[in-house]
Each structure stands twice: as C-alpha cells, then as structure tokens.
Image: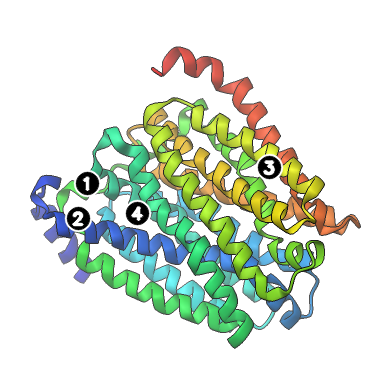
C-alpha cells in the first residue's frame, strides 16, 4: 500500500535538476556516497579481517576466501537480476530497497556460526551492490548532466574508495579489538543512517523514473558491452589478488605487526581515491586512455611488488600504485558501457559493478590457488598480473581498433 502511494507521489512530481536547491543536491550526493561508503566498507573489511574469522571458524586462509567469493557472486548475480526485476521502479525507491537489503545481509553476517552460513550471508550482502551503483550513477547524472557521466560515476564511487581509506581500516581495527562480528553490526548501523539520508535527501521526482525491462535487456545484445565486461572482469582482478591477502602480506611477507594492517589498508585506499578522481577526468575527455594507462601502470607496479615487496617502503608504494592505477580505469569502463547501450544506463552501471566483483572472485581465487599450490602469499600478486595482462590483451583484440573508428576521441 505504502509503496504504491509513494510511486504515485513520485510520478506526480516533476523536478528539473535546476529546480532542486544546491544544498539539497549536495545532501543527495552525500547520501549516495554514504551508501557506497557503507557498501565498500563491508566488501573490503571482509578481506582485512579474513584471519580473524578464519581462526574463529577453524579454517585455513584459502577456505576463508569462500566468504569473499560468496559476496562477489552475490554482486554478479544480483546486479542484473535485481536491476531487471526492479526496472520500472523509481531510482529513489530502488536505492531505498537496496540499502535495506544490504543492512539485513550484514546483520546476518554477524550471526553466522560457520563458513557456509557466513558465505551465504555475504552473498545476500553483495546482491544489492551492483544495482545500487547503477541506480546511484543515474541519480548523480541527473544532477551533473549526461556530458559529465564520468564525474558522476566517480562521485558515487568516491564513497567506496574512501571506505578503503577510513571504513575498512577502522572496521579491521574494530574487529581486532572487539571481535569481527561487531564489525558487521557496526556497518549495519551505519547503513541504517545511510538509508535515512537517502530517504530524506534524494528528491522524489518523475525525472528519476524507471524504464522498460525490454530497453534494459537490449543493452545485453551489444557485443561491445560483453567485451567490456570481460576486459573489466579480467583486468580489475589484480586489485583483489593483492587486497584479499593484505593481512598475510603485511604479517608474513613484510613481517610487520598485525596492528599495521589498517595502515596498509588506508594506503591502498588513498591510492584508489586518487585514481578514481583522475579516472573521472580521463573518462569524460578520452575514449580508452584511462583504461590503457591504468592497466599498464598496474602491471608495472605488480612486477615491482613481486620482486621487491619484502621492503616496507617498496611494499607501501606499490599498494598505493596498484590502487591508484587500477581505479583510474574504472570510470572509463562505466562511461564506455553506457555509451555502447545508452538506453540501459542503470543496467550498464550494475553490470560494471558485476564485472568488478567477478574480478573480486577471480583475484581472490587466483591468489588462493597460488597459495594452495604451496607457494608463499608473496606470489599472490602474480596471479593478478596474469589476469590484468589478459584483460589488456582482450581490449586490444576486441575493442581498440573498432572503437577508434566509431567513437570520437
């Protein structure tokens, strides 16, 4: 009853972006970023506390990555499924539903009694992520304008990258001091605050109406959309081949105290935030330059990390470099996907996040495979190198030549 009345109210309200006060716009954008901050904190904190819940469940680190993989699969399956099921919903309504589901998933995560139930809870937590970023990008573009889509998406992603600076390290510290279960309870509480902020600050307007399921699905008929998804899924995985094992890398490879793990997470997050800002600029001005530069510099950083990463300062510099270089590529991926399928912006945003979480699963799986084969965790970044190199290869084979002739530089 309330949902129908609410949708009717939104349909009756037609607001142009210029008619929304600047203060209200700023608060709406803050609410979007706060939601993505919560989601990013939940995603990345699981990697920072992997040793804690592994010890609690009495399992080894490769088995503990099942929770990371479960979250990633939740994003991958939830991104298209939730977006299509809710295609006709007003984007504001969709954001509220997604944030509520995310809160439930984190409460369940805090209650899990074994790795199987924990992986299921992380799967539920991951389901809203892709659709949230897709809908959030549409709302941000409503304020910024279509010609600044890269900046709009980068702003929504800012919450996620800032989460790697403050949210994930603080959540890791909380897990180390008060127990990993309290990490998820604290995130659920912050998610409830984000839910209220979205409710009060994002305008209820017909301008944010949903679209046809047919239109959204039509975007998946484009070969270049799928090529870009493959490029993203392979290439971005190197972030997670490093980040998923950052705890063992700090303690076992660089041989630092576990208390320095939050610092290492923060350095990685600063790099991601810087790269995200630069990536938004590149995405609005060039075709694929952000992607090529990002992937290429990441490969260089991974080689240095795998050769000289036992040195503390080299390790810290490489964490920053990998985060910055890879994040610089992500806004370009989003803008290009939306360019390829302009009739399905929400689904393209969701599929971009789905691709990033395939990368999450691939990176964690690849690094875990290296460790399970008997090699030191020091070699887990090399799995990321192989996957990112494969993504760059697919780009050059499938997209670079045709893009040059069809997309203005």
CA gap, disc 1 and disc 4: 22 Å
CA gap, disc 2 and disc 4: 24 Å
Do the CB atoms of the residues marked 1 and 3 lie less than 8 Å apart? no
Rate crowding at label 4 as few (under 14), some (14 to 19) or many (20 or more) other CA atoms within 10 Å. Answer: some
Which residue is under mark 2? 25
Residue 361 shows up from this direction: no
Instruction: Determine whether, in the image, residue 195 is placed left or right of residue 186.
Output: left
CA gap, disc 4 and disc 3: 41 Å
For numbered disc 2, what is the local secondary structure? helix
CA gap, disc 1 and disc 2: 7 Å
Question: Toward which corner of the image does residue 142 lie, by quadrant?
Answer: top left
Rate crowding at label 1 as few (under 14), some (14 to 19) or many (20 or more) other CA atoms within 10 Å. Answer: some
Extreme residue in the right direction: 374
CA gap, disc 2 and disc 3: 38 Å
Choose the circle earlier in sequence order: 1 or 3: 1
Choose the circle earlier in sequence order: 1 or 2: 2
Which residue is under mark 1? 143
| Residue in view at x 57 percent, y 72 percent | 121
For the C terminus, give its image quadrant. top left
For numbered disc 1, what is the local secondary structure? helix
Which residue is under mark 3? 301
Which residue is under mark 4? 86
């Amino acid at each position: 009853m309330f949902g129908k009345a609410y949708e009717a109210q939104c349909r009756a309200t037609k607001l142009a972006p210029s008619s929304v006060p600047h203060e209200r716009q700023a608060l709406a954008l803050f609410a979007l970023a706060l939601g993505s901050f919560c989601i990013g904190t939940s995603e990345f904190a699981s990697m920072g506390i992997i040793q804690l819940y592994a010890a609690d469940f009495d399992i080894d680190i490769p088995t503990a990555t099942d929770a990371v993989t479960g979250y990633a699969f939740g994003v991958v399956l939830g991104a298209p499924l939730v977006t299509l099921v809710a295609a006709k919903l007003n984007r504001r309504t969709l954001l509220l539903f997604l944030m509520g589901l995310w809160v439930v998933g984190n409460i369940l995560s805090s209650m899990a009694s074994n790795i199987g139930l924990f992986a299921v809870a992380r799967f539920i937590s991951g389901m809203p992520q892709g659709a949230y970023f897709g809908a959030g990008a549409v709302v941000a573009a409503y304020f910024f304008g279509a010609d600044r889509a890269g900046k709009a998406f980068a702003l929504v992603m800012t919450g996620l990258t800032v989460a790697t600076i403050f949210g994930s390290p603080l959540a890791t510290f909380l897990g180390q001091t008060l127990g990993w279960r309290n990490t998820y309870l604290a995130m659920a509480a912050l998610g409830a605050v984000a839910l209220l902020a979205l409710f009060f600050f994002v305008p209820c307007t017909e301008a944010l109406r949903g679209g046809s399921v047919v239109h959204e699905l039509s975007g998946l008929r484009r070969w270049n959309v799928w090529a870009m998804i493959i490029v993203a899924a392979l290439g971005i995985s190197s972030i997670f081949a490093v980040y998923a094992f950052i705890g063992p890398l700090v303690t076992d490879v660089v041989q630092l105290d576990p208390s320095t793990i939050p610092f290492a997470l923060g350095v990685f997050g600063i790099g991601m935030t810087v790269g995200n800002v630069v990536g938004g600029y590149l995405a609005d001005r060039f075709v694929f330059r952000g992607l090529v530069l990002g992937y290429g510099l990441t490969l260089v950083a991974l080689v240095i990390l795998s050769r000289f990463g036992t040195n503390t300062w080299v390790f810290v510099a490489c964490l920053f470099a990998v985060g910055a270089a890879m994040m610089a590529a992500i806004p370009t991926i989003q803008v290009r996907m939306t360019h390829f399928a302009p009739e399905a912006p929400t689904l393209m945003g969701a599929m971009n996040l789905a691709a990033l979480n395939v990368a999450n699963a691939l990176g964690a799986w690849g690094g875990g495979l290296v460790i399970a084969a008997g090699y030191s965790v020091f070699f887990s970044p090399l799995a990321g190198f192989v996957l990112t190199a494969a993504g760059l290869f697919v780009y050059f084979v499938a997209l670079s030549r045709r893009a040059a002739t069809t997309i203005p530089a």
